[in-house]
Image (cartoon, grey):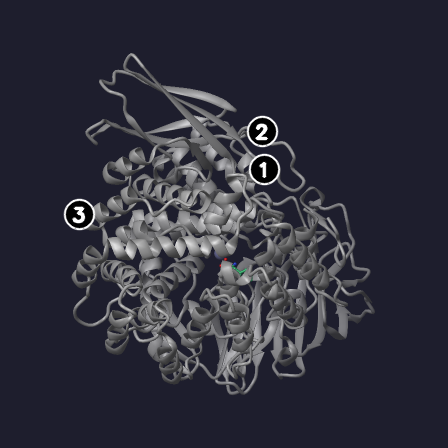
Amino acid sequence: MKDLTGKTIYLKDYAPPAYLVDEVHLTFALAPEATRVKSRIRFRPNPDSASRDFFLHGEELTLISAVIDGAPVTPKITEEGLTCPAPDAPFTWEAEVEIAPARNTALEGLYMSNGMYCTQCEAEGFRKITYYPDRPDVMSVFTVRIESDLPVMLSNGNPGDSGPGFAEWHDPWPKPAYLFALVAGELVNHPGSFTTNSGKDVELNVWVRPGDEGKCAFAMESLKKSMKWDEEVYGREYDLDIFNIVAVDDFNMGAMENKGLNIFNSAAVLASPETSTDANFERIEAIIAHEYFHNWTGNRITCRDWFQLCLKEGLTVFRDAQFTADMRSEPVKRITDVIDLRGRQFREDNGPLAHPVRPESFVEINNFYTATVYEKGAEVIGMLKRLVGDEAYAKALDLYFERHDGDAATIEDWLQVFKDTTGRDLSQFKLWYSQAGTPRVAVEETWEDGTFTLTFRQSTPPTPGQPDKAPRVIPIAVGLLGPNGDEVQETTLLELTQAEQSFTFTGLSARPVPSILRGFSAPVILDRQSSNAERAFLLAHDTDPFCKWEAGRALARDVLLRMLNDGAAPDRDFLGALAATLADESLDPAFVALVLALPSEDDLAQAQVDAGRVPDPQRIHEVREAMLDAMAEALEAPLRRAYDAHQVPGPYSPDADAAAARALANTALMLLSRRDGGALAQAQYDRADNMTQQLAALSALLTAGAGDDALRAFEAQWKDDRLVMDKWFSLQAAHAAPDAAATVARLTEHPAFTMKNPNRFRAVFGAFAMNQAGFHHASGDGYRLMGDWLIRLDRLNPQTTARMCSAFQTWRRYDADRQDMIRDTLRRIISVDGLSRDTAEMIGRILDA
Ligand code: PHE
Ligand code: ZN
């Protein structure tokens, strides 16, 4: 790999810290241009380290003074930190540094957002606040004093003394520096409380900017539900007197689990029926839960080093998915998670950015907060649970919490608790953590004398740095259906461990139809020859909701590919199967909406690659549109019935049932708008009293080519609401049209466009990157525009720039002209003087593979 600006860090080089920290005292004298940070730190030599090199991380700090045990010292300072002779015995370090939060546009360390001070320290941001051993295996108790005239001053742990101009906080739980947080500003709170299982009262607050206090109730309810759920399902109680959540507009990610002081992107907290969609409500509930669950999986038990990131993230994503499944619909959650996994993680695993769930090296750790670490990391835990069973999983988790509370742990520690509770050898299973790439599992079947045999072959394609892969343990859940649609074999778990393996089912009276990979029991690609008649049969009869949906999806993909490659017409049988699904009133409307949704243009591009073809983004768009038109025509009457039958009466409620009804009605609306010029959508737009209905109507109007007035009306209505305006930007950037790049360029000239707010930048360029036909337009305008803006953004915010580079990760799929144009853009970016380490690593990886 081309390594322009940074050195590569390897897992195999891990060494314990030379010094440990017992106590940290921090005093912040806040000022936008010159904040003074005083630290007093108790160090002691680490008995587990032979080194006595005293090194503290520190970046972009102005050191004012440094003292060891009362005597001034003159450390040697580099761009990465400082070194200094230190005693081989416990000692006290005192330092003062100056930083400028108002000039911090990277949104890492201490920065300002709308006049409010806030911090983001994960992964390595604390070193931009003061000199410190900024690594997760150094855990300590923090006491913090904040000095400022601002009315609200918060930090981790429990509140201590406070008075005019100052506030003190003490966090009794040892933690790594990445969990440190500080907030100060003119904030208002939405209060709440929770009584833990053992009777402790906890004060809860959601802190927001004045004016947003009406949008906090849902987050507060979600927090209480999460606290209750973690007690009931995992036996985990909260451990401080207070839990604060703060909403901030300028934030690189979704949210951050700082101990006792979660900081959230305001998009992941603020909710009201008028301004938030059903999808927003569900996401907010999930993120609140995710950050709260980190209190145990991440904070009480943290990671030894950043290679172990999936230890906390995979597990916490797995836990928040369980929570959402319990709060809402389990099948719908599973299916939407699989769609997301395939759309983001399989795509990553299949290209130049592929890396193991536990990476073995990195240049910039911020580049490894990926779908692979998070979502595949969660899938790996799901497989483990399936393999050992629910009871053993619960026991292993109890042991994990008991054994590792207070530790900075590793994946080895995690697997050991499973080994100790089940006696199972997990050495082969562990390959899921070290081998990148999505396994492909081909299956063949034979039927002879009442015996049905399934033969599986697994293989994993090469990924960067990993040409050869060993067979993995793959749990495959299988059921069998008889010819009349009855289930003749209920779900059973097959364990693949070899490259090739057969399983037989005996005593069957007729050849069954297999339902394979039920519940998506492993994150693999299943290759199976099947007829469309059989797929329609499974769509109609499968008892497993995932496989039922998957059958419909495979059918849709096949039909679309035949339209693309053979010029076939939209398939009548497929349309018939959709009609049957629409007519089945026993189905959850959210499930029906998922069956009606076609594979994305990106999915189809990948399907073309898998079939050995070069995808043509424009053609894919046209064919998919033709299919949607055909669906609208063939299903007009049942869609209209579904639309009418799923209007939700009464005031808006974000609950799962109401959201499911709206999901189906709005899917129907999107299709019907292809027939009526947008009349129904305009009517819905005019009467909408909630954002779900309003935004769906606006989107349908755009599809019908009749959205101009509504776009203007929407802007006039919502110009003062940043989060709603993000939707307005996004919708237009995502709208497929030959001149999409021109539309996006125009959006960047809108007075409300700003590069400084990551949500706004992503609303435009994140949406544009997903707009296949627009971004990949043959002119290359899309690539150039994206390149120009990534170069501009990199100077302000490397982290967000680097994440957006993944827009180019699929570039090898395309024809030579497009590849040339993308290569030019990538080279133009990487040759920028002073390009960030974050972006240089990403572009380097994308180019070299
Ligand atoms: N740890 C955060 C989460 O998963 C994500 C995050 C990473 C936020 C890095 C900010 C910076 O909840
Ligand atoms: Zn997380």
At 55% across and 48% down in the image, what residue appears? 348
Residue picked out by circle 1: 435
Residue picked out by circle 2: 470
Q: Position of residue 145 (x, y in %)?
A: 57, 76
563 shown above or below 686? above
Outermost residue toward the top in this view = 449
Disc 3 residue type (three-letter): Ser
At 38% across and 61% down in the image, what residue appears? 283
Disc 1 residue type (three-letter): Gln
Q: Nearer the viewer, mark 1 or mark 3?
A: 3
Quick check: marks 1 and 3 in contact, CB under 8 Å? no
Disc 2 residue type (three-letter): Ala
Residue picked out by circle 3: 586
Secondary structure at badge 3 equals loop
Quadrant for residue 777, please give it.
bottom right
Quadrant for residue 566, please give it.
top left
